[in-house]
Amino acid sequence: MRLVVAAALVDDLERPSTLLAARRSAPPALAGRWELPGGKVEQGESPQQALHRELAEELGITAQLGEEVVHPDGAWPLTAQLRMRVWWGLVRTGVPEPLQDHDELRWVHLPGWSRLDWLPGDVPLVERMQRLAGC
């Protein structure tokens, strides 16, 4: 089992109303679908270290991480081999840009978070986050 980490970058950790979505540009099977920014945890990294590295590489930003969006089983299932942990976050420095693996970023306002064409593994997560945010 491989661990993936992602950030639910929002406008406010206490009362989120806007969420940053990233549209995949590769691989071809995933291109055009939306996801939360992040990536795989490498050997020797903590999940939070991996997430900070991925946000710098993919978006050119630093972030403040908030609470984890916890799945009842501990991690969100993506595929048979991948599980994902997700943290709420705020952009601290930089302006998010699609530097790697994405061709578009979009700030999505509630209640429209779940209206994007999310990757299948992200759908239940985004629906849960939308409920947590009050919609």
Image (spheres, rainbow, N blue to C red):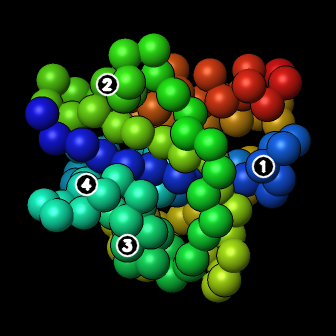
Q: Amino acid at mark 3?
A: Arg
Q: Is residue 121 visible?
A: yes
Q: Is residue 45 shown left or right of residue 80? A: right
Q: Earlier in the sequence, mark 4 or mark 1?
A: 1
Q: Is residue 9 above or below residue 128?
A: below
Q: Earlier in the sequence, mark 2 or mark 1?
A: 1
Spatial CA span between label 4 and label 1: 24 Å
Q: What residue is at 16 percent from the left and 64 percent from the top?
A: 44
Q: Secondary structure at mark 4?
A: strand
Query: Which residue, given by chain and number where applicable, does mark 3 sit on?
Result: 53
Q: Position of residue 32 (x, y in %)?
A: 42, 49
Q: Earlier in the sequence, mark 2 or mark 3?
A: 3
Query: Which residue, given by chain and number where applicable, does mark 1 sit on?
Result: 13
Q: Earlier in the sequence, mark 2 or mark 4?
A: 4
Query: Which residue, given by chain and number where applicable, does mark 4 sit on?
Result: 40
Spatial CA span between label 2 and label 4: 14 Å
Q: Earlier in the sequence, mark 3 or mark 4?
A: 4
Query: Which residue, given by chain and number where applicable, does mark 2 sit on?
Result: 77
Q: What residue is at 55 percent from the left and 46 percent from the top?
A: 87
Q: What residue is at 78 percent from the left and 49 percent from the top?
A: 13
Q: Is residue 96 above or below residue 131?
A: below
Q: Of residues 67 and 125, which is closer to you in this image?
A: 67
Q: Secondary structure at mark 2?
A: strand
Tell us which disc is closer to us: 2 or 1. 1
